[in-house]
Image (cartoon, coloured by chain):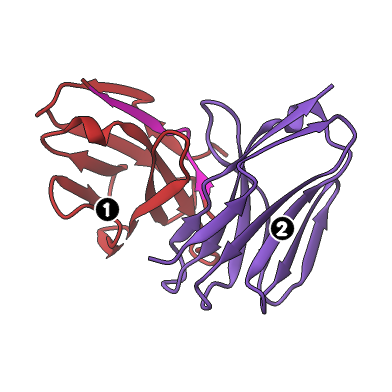
Amino acid sequence: GENVEQHPSTLSVQEGDSAVIKCTYSDSASNYFPWYKQELGKRPQLIIDIRSNVGEKKDQRIAVTLNKTAKHFSLHITETQPEDSAVYFCAASTNSGYALNFGKGTSLLVTP
Amino acid sequence: NAGVMQNPRHLVRRRGQEARLRCSPMKGHSHVYWYRQLPEEGLKFMVYLQKENIIDESGMPKERFSAEFPKEGPSILRIQQVVRGDSAAYFCASSPPTVQETQYFGPGTRLLVL
């Protein structure tokens, strides 16, 4: 099946610093790229998404960029806070248009 | 507006038993998706359903697994004759009819097979 690669698998930053998580995908038909935040034992929560007709999208401290030519997209979190600590998953839509392929996740730890 | 509901939240079964997982989508959502999450892994797509229809079951194991979304009531993921390898978190997601890719997840059912 089509793959979504996500890096790094773990990321530790100090409070106030920025965090960047990168994903690549292989399905050229993918046109929707959501990011989910999952705290321990809880449901994945949609935090931001981007469609292929847009190169960048921002929502307060969170931004996502998409390079469709290179087939990669990134999540940027600025001014990190301890409550940002969680596992973050990127995903890409499949050629079916609705199922999502997920990366393996990045465990982000923000230390005070 | 209640979110996606799943029950039970935790389920323990012995090998060979059946597991039934239930999912009620968000109000106004007519599309349901099931995903499986193994420890320290991403979510893997299993099946996509609309009311009374299975649209895509390409991620479902060929045997022992089945899913339905009846006209009335929740969507059900059924695992027959469970084995230890079925132990995982099973998440349901729903989406509105007009924006199918935007999926909202339930709290998951954590299945443990002894």
Task: Give x and y (percent) for residue A43.
Answer: 53, 35
Q: Which chain is purple?
A: A
Q: Which amino acid, by three-letter code, is at mark 2?
A: Ser
Magenta-tinted stretch: B104-113
In the figure, B13 relative to B4: above or below? above
Residue A70 position by quadrant:
bottom right
- Chief SS of the magenta region: strand
In the figure, A87 relative to B47: above or below? above
Specify the subunit that label 2 lies on. Answer: A
Q: At 51% from the left edge and 77% from the top edge, which residue is drawn?
A: A29
Q: Which structural element holds mark 1?
A: loop
Task: Give x and y (percent) for residue A45.
Answer: 60, 41
The residue that mark 1 highlights is B71
Q: At 44% from the left edge and 46% from the top edge, which residue is drawn?
A: B43
Q: Disc 1 to disc 2, how far (Cα)?
A: 40 Å
Task: Give x and y (percent) for residue A46.
Answer: 62, 47
Residue B76 position by quadrant:
top left
Residue B102 visible here: no
Q: Nearer the viewer, residue B35 or B25?
A: B35
Q: Which chain is red?
A: B
- Mark 1 residue crowding within 10 angstroms, few (<14) / some (14–19) / many (20+): few
Q: Which structural element holds mark 2?
A: strand
